[in-house]
Amino acid sequence: MKKTLTLIALVSASPALAASKNPFSGEFYKLSNTDFIVSIAFLVFIGVLFYFKVPSMIGGLLDKRAEDIQSELDEARALREEAQSILASYERKQLEVQEQADRIVAQAKESAAEAAAQAKKDLEVSIERRIQAAQDQIASAEQGAVKQVRDEAARIAVAAAGNVVAKEITAAKSGSLIDDAIDTVAAKLH
C-alpha cells in the first residue's frame, strides 16, 4: 500500500506529466510522444530503484547516519560534562590557591610587622647600650680627671709641704721627728 501510494505520487510528479499539456488524452500514450517515453523511462528507473531496494538502502544509510550523529551528540554531551567537571575542579583549585595565597600574604604581613617590632626593640636596646657605654666612658673619664686632679693636687701639696717643712724644720727638729716616726712604726709592728 505504501509502495503504491509512493509510486502514484512519483508518477503524478514526474517531469513528463508536468511538461505535457494533457496527460489524459489518447495522443499522450503513443510511442512518438517524447513525454510518454520519458514517463515510462522514469517509471522504469523508479522500478529499478525499488527492485534493488535503493530506498531501503538509503533509509538504512540515513538511519546509520542518524545513529552516528546521535552517538557523536552523546559523546559531545559526555565530553561537555567532563569539561564542566574539570572546569569546576580547576575553579575549586583556583579558589584554594587564592585562599592559600591570601593566607601567605597575611602571614607575611604579620611576620613583617613582628620583624619590624623586633627590629625596633633591638634598635632601642642597642641605643640604650650605646648610651650606657657612653655614660660609662664619661663617668670613667670624670673619675680619671678627678683622680688626676687629686694626684696633681696631692703632688703640689706634698711639694709645697716639703718646701715649707724644709724651710721651717731645723736639724734638731728633724731628728726628733724621725725618732718619733721610728717609735710609731715600731709600736705598730709589734
Image: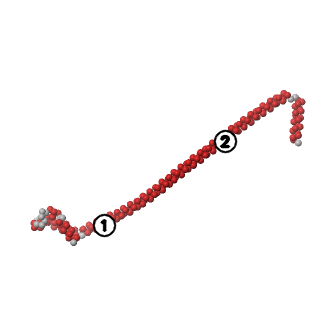
Q: Locate residue 72, reporting x and y percent.
A: 34, 63
Residue at x 34% of width, y 63% of height:
73
Q: Which mark is residue 132?
A: 2
Q: Which residue is mark 1?
A: 64
Q: Is residue 160 above or below residue 136?
A: above
- Mark 1 crowd level (few <14, some 14–19, many ≥20, 10 Å Cα): few
Where residue 149 sits: x, y (%)?
A: 74, 34
Question: Which of the two discs, 1 and 2, labels the residue nearer the N terminus?
Answer: 1
Q: Residue at x 78, y 31 (%)?
A: 156
On the picture, is 20 further left or further right than 101?
A: left
Residue appearing at x 49%, y 54% in the figure: 99
Residue 157 visible to an observer of this rendering: yes
Q: CA distance from mark 1 to mark 2?
A: 99 Å
Residue 34 visible, this orientation: no
Q: Residue furthest left?
A: 27
| Element at label 2 | helix
Instruction: Measuring from the top left, give residue 127's x and y in whole percent.
Output: 63, 42
> What residue lies at 44% left-to-right and 57% top-to-bottom?
91
Numbered marks: total: 2
Which secondary structure, mark 1? helix
Which quadrant does the N terminus fall into?
bottom left
The percent position of residue 31, horizontal first and vertical second, equals 11, 67
Disc 1 residue type (three-letter): Lys
Q: Is residue 103 left or right of residue 139?
A: left
